[in-house]
């Protein structure tokens, strides 16, 4: 498959870039995508939730009333879970939600997500560009010319550019990402992918 290369003025150039079908033209594997997104979100969870059980609650251990003869249910100390301020039954404990996912599955998931974007025509290629200074207004003008300013877009670069990153940081619908950091969740979470020419080569080198 070939895509036309645009310049930052939103105009078509005479250049075309050929996409590798092994990366951008496979049949999407939904289960691999599901696993990779689940893996990404699980790794982002802090897992710092914590509540105290009855052994951790501060309080007296005195038995509140005698065992028999009162006509009421038997109880222990004030830290019992049935009392207000007592411990929690089976409380949550700090834990890690991360799990292992094979590299081949991750690679397949990213290929599937990219192929889906290509199939839906939600991906475009622009010439490599840079900004002389961090200017949000200037970057927003580029997005308008590319007709992606009203969409949730992600600009993928081959190498980090501080001026581009700072220019896009304050735009709620735009995000800048490196090709080496591209993941399935971010691909699917964006409505439109804008890839630089050199980023395509970088993505294919990583995924092949």
Image: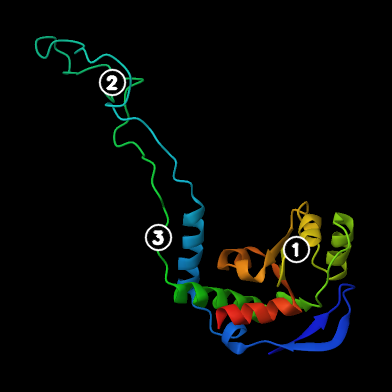
The residue indicated by pointer 1 is 151
| Of marks 2 and 3, the one in the foreground | 3
Res. 121 visible in picture: no
Labels 2 & 3 near each other (Cβ < 8 A)? no
Residue 161 in percent (x, y) is at 76, 64
Labels 2 & 1 near each other (Cβ < 8 A)? no
- Which disc, if any, is residue 184? none
Residue 178 in percent (x, y) is at 67, 67
Residue 36 in percent (x, y) is at 49, 67
Left or right of 128, for residue 38: left
Left or right of 46, for residue 16: right
Res. 130 visible in picture: yes
Among the 4 quarters of the image, the one containing residue 76: top left
- Which disc, if any, is residue 99? 3
Measured Cα–Cα span from mark 2 to mark 3: 36 Å
Relative vertical location of residue 121 with respect to residue 153 in this rendering, above or below = below
Does label 3 or label 1 sit earlier along the sequence? 3
Q: Which residue lies furthest to the left in this view?
A: 68
User: Which residue is drawn at the image coordinates 29% and 33% (left, top)?
Assistant: 89
Q: Total number of numbered labels?
A: 3
User: Which residue is drawn at the image coordinates 69% and 79% (left, top)?
Assistant: 200
Query: SS class of the residue under badge 2?
Result: loop
Does label 2 or label 3 sit earlier along the sequence? 2
Residue 204 in percent (x, y) is at 62, 82
Relative vertical location of residue 104 with respect to residue 81 in this rendering, above or below = below
Does label 2 or label 1 sit earlier along the sequence? 2
Colouring used for the render: rainbow
């Amino acid at each position: 498959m070939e895509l036309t290369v645009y310049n930052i003025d939103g105009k078509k150039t005479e250049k075309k870039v050929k996409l590798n079908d092994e990366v951008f033209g496979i049949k999407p594997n939904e289960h691999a995508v599901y696993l990779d997104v689940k893996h990404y979100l699980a790794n982002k969870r802090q897992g710092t939730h914590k509540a105290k059980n009855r052994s951790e609650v501060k309080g007296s251990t005195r038995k509140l009333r005698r065992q028999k003869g009162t006509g009421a249910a038997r109880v222990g100390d004030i830290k019992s879970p049935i009392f207000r301020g007592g411990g929690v039954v089976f409380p949550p404990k700090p834990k890690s939600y991360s799990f292992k996912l094979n590299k081949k599955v991750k690679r397949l998931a990213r290929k599937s997500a990219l192929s889906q974007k290509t199939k839906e025509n939600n991906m475009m290629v622009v010439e490599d560009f840079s900004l002389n200074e961090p200017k949000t207004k200037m970057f927003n003008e580029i997005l308008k010319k590319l007709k992606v300013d009203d969409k949730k877009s992600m600009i993928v670069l081959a190498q980090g550019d501080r001026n581009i990153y700072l220019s896009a940081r304050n735009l709620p619908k735009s995000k800048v990402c490196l090709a080496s950091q591209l993941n399935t969740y971010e691909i699917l979470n964006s409505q439109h992918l804008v890839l630089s020419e050199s980023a395509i080569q970088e993505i294919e080198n990583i995924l092949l």
